[in-house]
Image (spheres, rainbow, N blue to C red):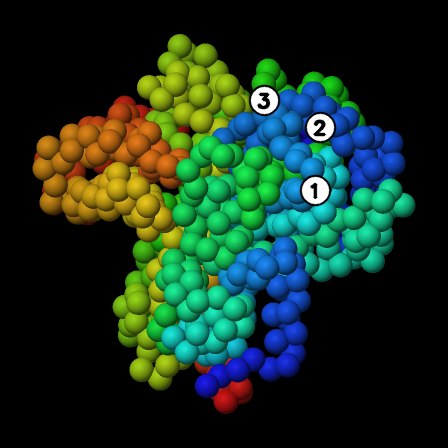
Amino acid sequence: MGVKLLLEKAHVEGIRGYEVYRREGGYRSVEKAIKTMSPEAIVEEVKKSGLRGRGGAGFPAGMKWSFIAKPESVPRHLVCNADESEPGTFKDRYLMEFLPHLLIEGLIVASFALGSNATYIYIRGEYAWVAEILEYAIGEAKTNGFLGKNILGSGFDCEIYVHRGAGAYICGEETALIESLEGKRGNPRIKPPFPAIQGAWLRPTVVNNVETLAAVVPIINMGGEEYAKIGVGKSTGTKLMSACGNINRPGVYEIDMTISVEEFIYSDEYCGGIAGGKRLKACIPGGSSVPILPANLLLKTAKGETRYMNYESLSDGGFATGSMMGSGGFIVLDEDQCVVKNTYTFARFYRHESCGQCSPCREGTGWMEKLLLRLEKGQGKISDIDLLWDIQRKIEGNTICPLGDAAAWPVAAAIRHFRDEFEWHVTHPDEAQVKNYGLAHYADPIHVPA
Amino acid sequence: MNKFSEEKLAKVKELISHYPEGKQKSALLPVLHIAQDTFGGWLSADTMDYVAELLSINPIEVYEVATFYSMYNLKPVGKYMFEVCQTGPCMLKGCDDIIGYIGNTLGIKPGETTTDGLFTLKTVECLGACGYAPMMQLGKSYREHLTKEKVDAIIAECRKSAATNN
């Protein structure tokens, strides 16, 4: 069993309620932070921990905090990004649903460190019942003196408000989220100015993912240096993985980033192997926007080394032969799955979610969707594959926000690694409608059925 | 024209208090959720104008938001809306069969409502329940690990609930 810092108590009976959470050691980090530490010392501790943003970008959290501007008499805000929408990702929901007080505890410490007296949890609108769980937990924290005026006699005031979105992937992008918090369409802003200087209501704002903020609790409790000893290299601490697709044990797992991809997929502690005794074909290890990898490149790097479940190892080989940790949305495809169809559903997703501000993304995502549908239906041409490649190249890097890149990467990787499967859909249009291309040379070379 | 009850107006006032003074527009998304829940599951132009008035903003500011977010319905929908996820992870777990089965059972295609006004079938993009696929959203709850049998049970449950509530 690996180290558990976040989900250790997830199965304790009644942990969703304040009483049990407190009895199990909850809110100790708030006491430690507010009574014995300065806001600067907390930021320093988070820097030392090496914690990287868990939403997808992996930016060092302590550094992000240190960027916040502190102009005289201008309020600052902390906003928790709970707009979890990257296909394949459902870890934040799990954390909020079963351990709401862990998030609130982290939010109080982070609010104190950043000087936020009004902190917001921007939660995706569909998680309506989770919003209710959070509101109830906030009420409990307030009743017990951890929120409201003069917390623990420190003179620090803090309120946490839950703000429900209404169905828009783009609002997971921090400036779109801020626009949405202000009651507008979720159109990302041009940066600079960054939110740390001018965020919500043009005030200095820090936006962090749910898991990032929850991780502040163990960091304060154990100290940044101790936290940094867990994991490997720049992948410190633990990471929540959402595992889904054709595996025996889909669900949310906390890993300490030292385990191999092979262990994560095949160990009964995690995914429990491929469902139905089938073979592994491919995997998207970090949410829909990161490159898909065929099994042979997933389990071992291009150099033939074991690939591990951490930021560096998953991206080993760059986009040519590697992928990314992303949001930790681990999507597994078995031998009977069609990569063209899977890529089509992602392209449709990004077309649906494009905010429409930038023409490369607005036009490009729709165009890619149409071409992929045509190929999937066996009505495509070989030149469509090259056209797809060309379109994704022209979206990437040419938009205000990373949604364009997120839409381009899955298409690029699918063509890069599975071009023969795309071509087969053109050369065998009728067959492609009744069966799948199969494993070809992509198969997992390690786990071969007898 | 529809108006909120005193209780709901108090809720709106409380929501506005969550945001800085003069930034009452920030309460727009939450207030639209309440309006949709209150006035028949969708937002008519009248409802949107009413929300604009409550928040002292221009009607256009409400329209541009209501048309942006997928959870706001701009047309009447059935009493029970089956929003079935169709993105990659759900596709890998057979959501196409579930969507087809619901459509055949209710005699409607995605985007349509049954003639008795009870059911709407809608395909949606990722709802963050990928590990529990295939799934759908029904009102404020998620129905996960869907099978044909489960779909039958959910439809029966809705019919029963409609019969007792009317």
Amino acid type at circle 3 is Ser
Residue B72 visible at all: no
Estimate how packed mark 3 is, as few (under 14), some (14 to 19) or many (20 or more) residues with alpha carbons within 10 Å.
Answer: many
Q: Which residue is mark 2?
A: A43
Could you tell me how far apart the alpha carbons at marks 3 and 2 are, in whole angstroms? 19 Å
Q: Tell which circle, 1 or 3, labels the residue nearer the N-terminal end.
A: 1
Q: Which mark is residue B42?
A: none
Name the element at disc 2: helix
Query: The residue under label 1 is which amino acid type?
Result: Ser
Question: What residue did someone put label 1 on?
Answer: A73
Residue A390 appearing in the image = yes
Label 3 residue SS: strand
Residue A81 pos. (x, y %):
56, 44
Q: Give the image location of residue A381, x and y in percent.
A: 10, 37
How many numbered markers are drawn? 3
Quadrant including the C terminus of chain A: top left
Badge 2 amino acid: Val
Residue in front for this viewpoint, A332 or A279: A332
> Closer to us: mark 3 or mark 2?
2
Looking at this view, is B99 or A325 the one in front? Answer: A325
Q: Chain of mark 2?
A: A
- Chain on which label 3 sits: A
Q: Position of residue A335 (x, y in %)?
A: 33, 36
Within 10 angstroms of label 2, few (less than 14), some, or many (20 or more) residues?
Answer: many
Q: Are marks 1 and 2 on the same chain?
A: yes
Q: Are marks 3 and 2 on the same chain?
A: yes
Secondary structure under tag 1 reads loop
Q: Is A398 left, or right, of A34 in this rendering? A: left
Disc 1 from disc 3: Cα separation? 37 Å
Residue at mark 3: A235
